[in-house]
Image (cartoon, rainbow, N blue to C red):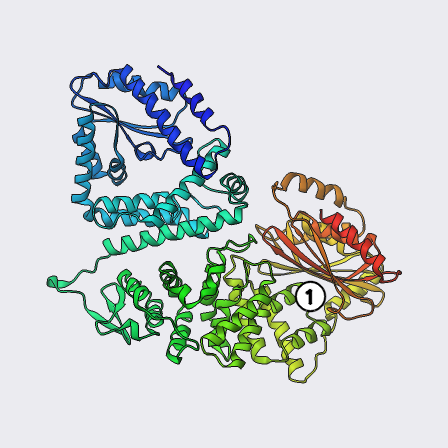
Amino acid sequence: MVLGGELAKAASRLLEGRHGRLGAAALRAALVDLYEFWLSKAAAAAGVDTAEPGVALVAVGGLGRRELVPFSDLDLVLVHNQNDQVAEIADALWYPLWDARIGLDHAVRTPAQALQVASEDLRTAMGLLDARHIAGDTDLADRLAAAARDQWRRTARKRLPELAESTHKRWQRSGEIAQSAEPDLKYGKGGLRDLGVLEALAVAQLTDRPGEELRDAKELLLDVRTELRRELRRDRDVLSAPDAELVAAELGFGDRFTLARKLAGAGRTVSYAVDVALRSTVDVPKSRFGRRPSRTPLDEGVVLHGNEVSLARDAVPAKDPALLLRVAAASARTGVPIAHGTLRTLADSAPELRTPWPVDARDALTELLGAGEGLIDAVEALDRTGLWARLFPEWGAVRDLPPRSPVHAWTVDRHLVQTCVEAAKLTTTVARPDLLLLGALLHDIGKGREADHSELGAAISAEVARRIGLPEADASMVSRMVRHHLLLPHTATRRDIEDPTTVHRVAKTVDNDVVLLELLQALAQADSLATGPGMWSDWKAGLLENLVSRCRQVMQGKGFSPPEPLGQEQRELVATAVRTGRVEVSISHDGTMATVVLAVPARTELLAPAAGVLALHSLEVHTATLRGHGNGRVGIFVASPKFGSLPDSALLREQLSRAVAGGLALEQKLAAKERDYSTPVRVVARPKVLWFDDETSGPNNVVLELRAPDRIALLYRVAGALQSCDAEVRWAKVATLGGAVVDSFAVAPRGVRLDQSWRQRVEQAVLAAAS
């Protein structure tokens, strides 16, 4: 007989070589054959086949389903009819597996004991549905499997609330596969455990057997799980981004983004099926005295029937093009799901909406988009049944499209819906709430192609607006919203909004249209809130409000005069620094946001030493403004902690003074911090420098924009590079987006000409500092 150690070696040999999509299934089949062969031989040697009274070795779990993935535990039950030697037989089976360090979940029970445990433990009851004979008394194994299924059919309906509760708790712990940067393939919503729930409901004859779409989703999830474990040589079910690159290449998907899109589609297919199944079995409406649930009118042709939105008895979908949108709007507005039968009827009977849409259809769309949180489930229901694509064929390009930036919490299609949810809260802040909602739905519709998504999206959104029947002026407004949806946040966080050139450029870009400016401000807030945690803050809101306020002044013909460069306190700080020849520091706090003001005599370097000290304390710089005043200079830094709380002000003030004076070994301290705290990354984008000649005022001023992966003390190193190239920094804006930064600097050459050779020298130095 093959010993346990040899079994482990044989299993390891199966994992060698390359497999691909077809090979992943073949690998699972080979593992099943290997373990079955070993268990059969081991059972025979232990006396299972000849034991009297009968004994049977039964597999459940992955081996029972013939879906064994690498490094899975073996789920085994030794079933017996009161056999006195069963303990010795069990030891002979279990110990070689333990010695070989093969995971084992085992039990020794009579059929009655197994059924009793199943009646008390939901996991055991569902596990026995996969029971399959491996060795020993075939009749005994078959009787147990049949009895377990029969008991489940008889008791399943009573156990459904427990099943639903455990499923929802698991989703809360593990998240949703379709919307997770690191999906849990087994326990996440839409994962393999949910497919087990669907199978169990089908065995209980409460739902239909999973169809082809669900079978395909299961095959993909199994293949990814198989390859993930083969690549890592351990039991792991959470797919990280670096591991996804390896798995995607092995399974023939090219890159992790293609794989992520496939997984998102599979996860949504499974999660929607589970939602429908649990709703139709667990949440069956109860009525008194056996009467049918009432039908409460919600809209023309739409009723609330029990716990679902359904069609009224007299509704005629084939003759009512707007009915689909009224059903969806009613569902979103009430938070009640659409009955699956209603969705099927609409899919079969609802006519295409002709261009231009009738007014009632357009009104229903506006109501749907402005419904708030209920919009998410309503759109998901329509999308899963092909109805959303019937309304918006353009949606296919962004469906399940994974974000390229880690700051995005959702797939692109879900982000668009989430932006509508946030925009619905802002409809009273704009003159055209209907256009705000439509712009929110379409602002990223151009993603997923090679072209600039804002430009392409502007063209697509104009077509959509005309198709749904908007007047040409409104269609143009929606198109311009999409084209410029990044204008305000990018300008406010990357440029000097106190510079008249910046303000006039923004006003000119929006054609001095106050309504468009208002819509863009609301859309920027909704977009940020729908992107991910930390993407909207009081600081960012304040920047946008200041920019918009100054643009309004210009549009109203009042002109724009920049504020006094320095306040009274700052001017006094500079005067003291000039008089004493020392660094003067002032620190103020607003929550977790700190404003650090440094005043020094003229010709004293400020940016690099200040950035270095702030980096030492893990403070993220958002803005840095450097100004001259008389014979002195002042630097104003707005920063917040990347984590934790603000450092001690006295220590920060002392270190800033020493650093500017050259008495702090910044280079060594920052190198040590980077060595101790930097985390390795496998995929790093290359830094890039862009130049902008007309986005700041002043002689010889240009804007240099650095886009680069984030690293400790990056601003300090870039500031040093600029100083070495005789580049005087007037202001800096720093935007950190996940693992990347967009740092903007208004620079002017100091004592040299602003020509191409100087630009090249600056660019090379900055890129070297950022690499």
Which of the 4 quarters of the picture holds residue 479?
bottom right
The residue positioned 69% from the left and 48% from the top of the image is 713
The spot of residue 422 in percent (x, y) is 47, 66
Residue at the limit of the structure toward the left, as seen here: 289
Would residue 167 be visible to someone looking at this image?
Answer: yes
- Is the residue 721 above or below the residue 65 in the image? below
Would residue 654 be visible to someone looking at this image?
Answer: no
The spot of residue 483 in percent (x, y) is 59, 69
* Left or right placement of residue 464 versus residue 188 in this view: right
**Which residue is more in the foreground, 77 or 207?**
207
User: How many badges with numbers are in the image?
Assistant: 1
The residue positioned 55% from the left and 52% from the top of the image is 406
Amino acid identity at mark 1: Arg
Which of the 4 quarters of the picture holds residue 126?
top left
SS state under label 1: loop
**Which residue is more in the foreground, 387 or 594?**
387
* Left or right placement of residue 548 versus residue 723 in this view: left
The spot of residue 458 in percent (x, y) is 56, 70
In the rendered image, which residue does mark 1 sit on?
Answer: 495
- Is the residue 573 above or below the residue 401 in the image? below
The spot of residue 480 in percent (x, y) is 58, 73
Which of the 4 quarters of the picture holds residue 336?
bottom left
- Is the residue 234 above or below the residue 97 in the image? below
The quarter of the image holding the N terminus is top left
The residue positioned 41% from the left and 43% from the top of the image is 221
Residue at the limit of the structure toward the bottom, as seen here: 557
Crowdedness of circle 1 by 10 Å Cα count: few (<14), some, many (20+)? Answer: many
